[in-house]
Amino acid sequence: MKEITRINHIGIRVTNLDASRAFYELLGFDFIVGPIGPEPVAVMEHPSGININFILNADQDTSVNMLMDVPEKHAGYTHMALEVSHIESIKSQLIEKGITITGGPIVLPDGAEFVFVRDPDGNVIEFHQPGQ
């Protein structure tokens, strides 16, 4: 479908809006609105235009991310990757803000480098600097 122009938003089911909001604000996202609608949903947006919808109806037990933390490989989205222009700066900022790097750094033969973190609900976020 040639009419698709970009990703409009990413939906993430969360247990606690305040904790999720605080975490994503550390990553530079701004709170827009919420909770709204029947789900309910809250919306945050990054100055780059990346929009996240928090779906506020998750069960309280998020000790296991079924897509990432169990031996069985379930179908579904496993993470979001945010492209960055300077991975060393990102790593420094994550450490400075007290956000644990849970994976990486991984460097590919083409020079691409990435690290992973987890949000308060265990959702995986990749910071990805493309190779040359």
Image (cartoon, rainbow, N blue to C red):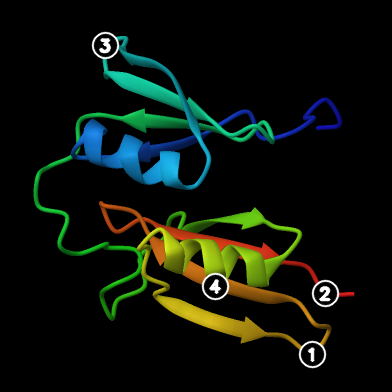
Quarter holding residue 132: bottom right
For the residues labelled 4 and 2, the Cα–Cα distance comes to 14 Å
Residue depicted at 43% across the width and 39% down the height: 25
Helix, strand or loop at label 1? It is: loop
**Residue with the mark numbered 3:** 38
For the residues labelled 3 and 1, the Cα–Cα distance comes to 47 Å
The amino acid on which the numbered mark 3 sits, given as a three-letter code, is Pro
**Residue with the mark numbered 4:** 115
Residue depicted at 44% across the width and 68% down the height: 95
Find out whether the residues at labels 3 and 2 contact each other: C-beta distance under 8 Å. no
Q: Earlier in the sequence, mark 3 or mark 1?
A: 3
**Residue with the mark numbered 1:** 109
Q: Earlier in the sequence, mark 4 or mark 2?
A: 4
Q: Which mark is drawn over residue 4?
A: none
The amino acid on which the numbered mark 2 sits, given as a three-letter code, is Gly
Helix, strand or loop at label 4? It is: strand
